[in-house]
Image (cartoon, rainbow, N blue to C red):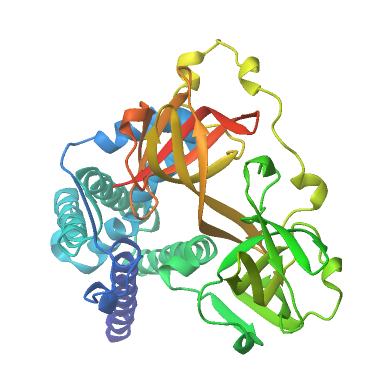
Amino acid sequence: MEQKSKYKSISKFIIICIFVAYIAIIFKIVVFKYHGFIDIFSKKSVSFTSLNLIPFKLWADFFENASGMGWAWAISNLFGNIIIFIPLGYLLPLIFKKAKNILPVACMAFVFSLVLESLQYVLAIGSSDIDDIILNTLGGVIGYLCYKIVAKVLVTNKKIYIGTIILTVLFLVSGFTVAKYEFGNMLGITKFEQEVIGGDVIPESRADYIGAFISYDDNIINMYDGMIVDSNVDTSLMEKLNVKVNKNTKIYLNTMKSKENKMTAEYNEYTDPVSSIEKNSTLSIWGKEVDGTIVAEIIVIQKPIINQEESTITHTEDKRNKKTTDNRSKDDIQIPEEKSDIEGCFKEYENDVIIINRIDNFESGESTISVSSDIKVKIKVQDDTNYIIKVITSAGEVRSIKSTSIDDMKKGDKLDVWGASVDGALIADKIVIIRIE
């Protein structure tokens, strides 16, 4: 009898330890996924607050936008809030005597979820939503029903404890594995490391000019003003620069390597002739203007992100002529699957012309790097240009997608533009406005 009591005490202690670990994980996933505890009170912390008190609004938004974002996306977002609270529902009855019935478990799950959502709002570190509370509470109830099934099948306390421990360990191990693979850097489970070799020769200040190499002749580098990172970039819209190279100009080659969670940047002196630089290589140039000519002091070369054959592709065909009127209402709120022709930050609009600061994205190993430039691009719009607004949280959670008009654009909005190049100008067919709220 004494041995049986001792075994029960040890089993319950293990359950309590698992419960404490589970609560800590929930706090990390829900409250501290974007900020550490100390970071929240730091001046450098970025505050973000969103509050929804309308029940089932989130559900309606998800299913309304499912056609554009995919049903798998909508279902995973909804059921994710349920799944993470299932362990709470079957652990509570094993720890607290008052949690042997469904009503106390539902109340505890509700209160715990309310605390988590309130903390996000008070600390300004996320979106607080009554729908999250409803889904979390539902998860707790499902977890309690799982406990009742396990208790009925296994019967004895000994088997129930063992079964629950095994179930919880499997749940936590599988959840941790997925979290590490999908959200490791965000949750702080894995750390992205950066190593720089030979970087002491490169100025700490931002390069004075960044562009894509075209050719070299008579000590003059011809280059585009801006990087070419995608085959959809229309070079006819880009300005060109001439940069003078002299005997004092120092040239380095930057090689980037990415492996799992580590990025290595290595700088070596470039000893080959300048004329041998590959077309479309990215050039970062530190220098000054002398008598109207840019004189390079330091040049850093990065290998081209796409090959030169791809980069010469231009959109000379007017794709607007290929539009069909079938399912037009559906297309109006559907984001194209193909990559946008250009993206940037909205600056101003006047006389049917939108001006944006271009954003460039390129792949480096397993990472995608976005570069915001000062390059201004003009985009023409017409009466049949289709506008969509996609509202997201600072955490990247999609709140809504719907049709809108050009009047809804605000300075700083990110624009994804699909269109056709006609006579050197990009005419927009569809513009997706991405706004963080």
Q: Is residue 100 visible?
A: no
Q: Write the residue at 39% across / 58% down.
A: 154
Position of residue 380 relative to residue 29, above or below, is: above
Q: x, y (%) of residue 302?
A: 71, 68
Q: Write the residue at 58% across / 35% down.
A: 337
Q: Is residue 117 found left or right of 293 in the rendered image?
A: left
Position of residue 338 relative to residue 90, above or below, is: above
Foreground of the two, 1 or 59 = 59
Task: Find residue 287 and report its image quarter.
Answer: bottom right
Task: Find residue 423 and report its image quarter.
Answer: top right
Q: x, y (%) of residue 248?
A: 72, 84
- Residue at the extreme front: 291
Q: Is residue 197 found left or right of 35 in the rendered image?
A: right
Q: Write the residue at 48% across / 69% down.
A: 185
Position of residue 318 relative to residue 414, above or below, is: above
Image label count: 0
Foreground of the two, 391 or 323 = 323
Q: x, y (%) of residue 28?
A: 33, 68
Foreground of the two, 142 or 128 = 128
Q: x, y (%) of residue 132?
A: 26, 47
Q: Is residue 394 found left or right of 288 in the rendered image?
A: left
Q: Is residue 54 visible?
A: yes
